[in-house]
Amino acid sequence: MVGDPILPVKHNVRVYGNVAKEEIGVVEKKILELYDIFGEAPKYVEVSFFENESWIYKVNSREAKTIKQILSIEPTLFSTAHPISSHAWFDYPSIGINMSLFLPLPQDIKIAWLERIVVNTILHSTLASYNIQRPPLLARLRILDFLDKQIIEIGFKLFVNSIYEFEISKYLVSKQSLDYQIKYFIYYLKISPKEREGIKANERILDIQFLTLLSRFVYLFGAMPIYVKTRDEKLLMGIESNLSLFPKYVYQDIWQILSSYLPMLTFDTQKNIDFLLPRIIWVVRKIDRYIK
């Protein structure tokens, strides 16, 4: 990219562990450049570079205690499973980059990750964006035969992340070329034969079906706006490959969520959750009835 960003973005960089200054400089410049491309930015953003996940655990542990003291809640902070993540639990967006996972990625996928995380800090830049209220309807899942009730909480967090991913893609569709995003979703929608075999082998265990459904929604919700805009055939193949993970009797229900209900969503995360949750519960209860 040519030239320096012209949109002023107040930001701070934190480094944990052994991270090369050159690598920090490249990523920092790209983040600022993307705010310039999108033409908007949060008032302040903090970018943390972590050598590896052990540093993320340390920072998360310390900062979660502070947030719990202030808000009396257990926050979800930086991910140790993904190369980049963000949150706004301190009422400003914080980006965390796990360099041990980020650096080995193909260049196109790195750029796509940075595009998505920058948009996330634009759309979800305040505490209110992350302090999501759990709808009373969520309690209906508790009547199902889950072996571990904590799975419902894990599933709900995945569901919220899916909504964020949809909102990010919806924003990107209106802003720029989607070449990197197409490659990103083709990359992450891939299911290895071993993964497929494991999911199929446990298709009568509701816990696993539930978490598989919500974990794949994280990518499917993000992929759909990109596909609707581009009609990319390889992207469609990736979407269909993920849909084939689930029993045939819920295929149409899931496809209806993706093709009919997602386009109705806006950029109001709480309303999106309240609107889609009954449809998700319907699919889960249908799986439960068939398993029984």
Image (spheres, rainbow, N blue to C red):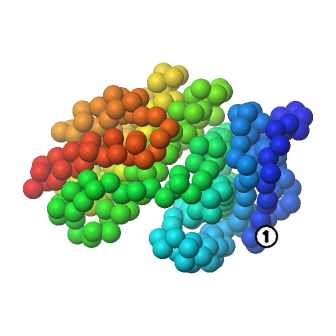
Q: On the image, which quarter does residue 97 sit in? A: bottom right
277 above or below 86?
Answer: above
Name the residue at 70% across, 34% down.
38
Name the residue at 74% across, 53% down.
44
Count of marks placed on residues: 1
Please provide percent x and percent y for residue 98.
66, 61
Q: Few, some or many C-alpha atoms within 10 Å of disc 1 (few <14, some 14-19, many ≥20)?
A: few
Q: Is residue 72 left or right of residue 211?
A: right
Could one spot residue 153 in this view of the protein? yes
Q: Classify the position of the N terminus by image quarter.
A: top right
Mark 1 — residue?
18
Could one spot residue 191 in this view of the protein? no
Q: Is residue 207 left or right of residue 22?
A: left
Please provide percent x and percent y for residue 155.
36, 58
Q: Classify the position of the C terminus by image quarter.
A: bottom left
Name the outermost residue toward the right: 3
* Towards the viewer: 73 or 243: 73
* Towards the viewer: 200 or 90: 90
Q: Label 1 is placed on what type of residue? A: Asn
Please provide percent x and percent y for residue 193.
39, 48
Question: Circle 1 — which element?
Answer: loop
Name the residue at 79% across, 46% down.
9
Please provide percent x and percent y for residue 157.
42, 57
Q: On the image, which quarter does residue 279 sit in? A: top left
* Towards the viewer: 255 or 242: 255
Q: On the image, which quarter does residue 23 sit in? A: bottom right
Q: Is residue 146 left or right of residue 64?
A: left
